[in-house]
Image (cartoon, helix red, strand yellow):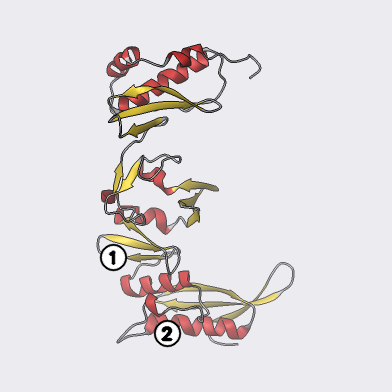
Amino acid sequence: MSQGVFPAQKKDGTRYYRASVTYRRKHISLGGYRSESDAGNAYREACLILESQNPPLTLSDYDSSFVLPFEKWVVLINFRDNKMYFHTPIYVRPHFFYYYYSPELVLKFDTDDLFYYASHKIMKRGNHYFAADFGMQVNILNRYGIMNYAVCGRDYRFINGDNTDFRRENLFIINKYRGVSFVSSKARYCAKVHINGNYLIGFYDTMEEAAIAYNKAVDILKQNGCQTAYVQNYLENMTKDAYTEAYMRLPVSKKIYELTFPKNQ
């Protein structure tokens, strides 16, 4: 049997081979392979990555002809260079880190997020990134106070124009409340609620006022028999008295008051 290769068997009896390497006293699994030769090549490839010097192998040297997957290259090179082992494809820099979703797609995060992404794998659906968290797919924008339905350019933007740079200093939140959007032509915030289509609640001077008006409209709808489970906005830095004053003062469209709903809705 080749060095670093161990025979194994699946539940259905199929035989395969596992490869692993020990580096800096850490035992690193390199995955399972159909043949002993593939597992042996994986072991030798890992040794080459970990022991290469003058110059060392880098991620730019990777191509599809190698046995080890690209993610494992990232893990091994980071461990070699930074003496930190992570199961996810992270490469640490002095004040931030890269998360290599693929050789072509590299995300950038603050060091403060290192612990989270070291144990949470990122997935992509369309233009949205998710992390597997307790069996659910959680939009990574939620970590920055950005809602799932938020639209880039309308509700938030990347300051340097790089939509792969998720460092907090690069994220500017334009709007963080449900049912609220900024209307540049009016230079005011618009509040809307969705009831088989969007209903205008009104225009307001601040996003906080629009968020409170949204809450007020939801309360009115519930009083009129609407059974939709709307999630209301929470204004973290507003006192109860200030919230109540704004709630009583802010107008809501007459159409919201006039909506009624059947009891068996």
For label 1, the residue is: 93
The disc at residue 48 is 2
Name the residue rendered at 59%, 86% in the picture. Answer: 37
Relative image position of residue 157 (x, y in whole percent): 32, 46
Task: Tell me where residue 57 sits by quadrant.
Answer: bottom left
Q: Which amino acid does label 1 sit on?
A: Arg
Q: Can residue 236 be seen in this view?
A: no
Task: Tell me where residue 152 sits by quadrant.
Answer: top left
Give above or below for 50 relative to 163. below
Mark 1 / mark 2, whichever is N-terminal: 2
Crowd around label 1: few <14 · some 14–19 · many ≥20 (10 Å):
few
Q: Which amino acid does label 2 sit on?
A: Leu
Task: Tell me where residue 34 sits by quadrant.
Answer: bottom right
Relative image position of residue 7 (x, y in whole percent): 63, 79
Q: Distance between the residues labelled 1 and 2?
A: 22 Å
Give above or below for 172 relative to 92. above
Tell whether 193 sits left or right of 169. Answer: right
155 or 34, which lies in front?
155
The disc at residue 14 is none
